[in-house]
Amino acid sequence: MPLANLPASPSQLARYPVEARDAYERFRTTGDMDALGIVILAAVRDFMPKRNLGAGNIELRPEMKLMEDLGYDSLAVAETVFFFEDLFKVRIQNTELMSVRTVAELQKFVVQKLGENAGKPTA
């Protein structure tokens, strides 16, 4: 499911590692879901509250809980959601996020939102 309607080289990814930027482009042009996973993990790492020293070196695992394990709070979750909305041109309701607790659930949620958005015309 290539998503050519997504912008090439979005400014939101400028501060991300080249691996994440390349993965976004691969996802955008080919629909490579592994590439999408790289982008999502880069965002999770980027929005992880910095109060945990060494947080950037944590190996993210699918079962990790955003709040309990990674130190996310409601503000960090909201910032992450705004980022995904902006990057992937999807609309996410706050109530939809109530069930997202882990890294894997967040990945599944973003994939679902992109699938819903794939058939919609761009504005």
Image (cartoon, helix red, strand yellow):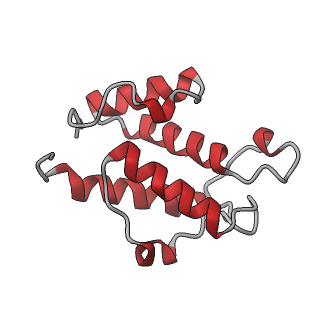
Q: Position of residue 6 (x, y in %)?
A: 27, 36
Give residue 16's quadrant in the image. Answer: top right
On screen, 71 above or below 89? below
Give residue 45's quadrant in the image. Answer: top right
- Residue ID at (76%, 40%): 56
Residue, far right: 53
- Can you say which quadrant of the picture contains the N terminus? top left
Q: Nearer the viewer, residue 78 or 107?
A: 78
- Residue ID at (13%, 52%): 119
On screen, 106 above or below 54? below
Left or right of 73 in this view: 90: left
Q: Nearer the viewer, residue 92 or 62?
A: 92
- Residue ID at (42%, 61%): 109
What is the count of numbered marks? Answer: 0
On screen, 6 above or below 88? above
Q: Position of residue 23 (x, y in %)?
A: 45, 28
- Residue ID at (58%, 63%): 77
Q: Position of residue 111 (x, y in %)?
A: 36, 53
On screen, 65 above or below 49? below
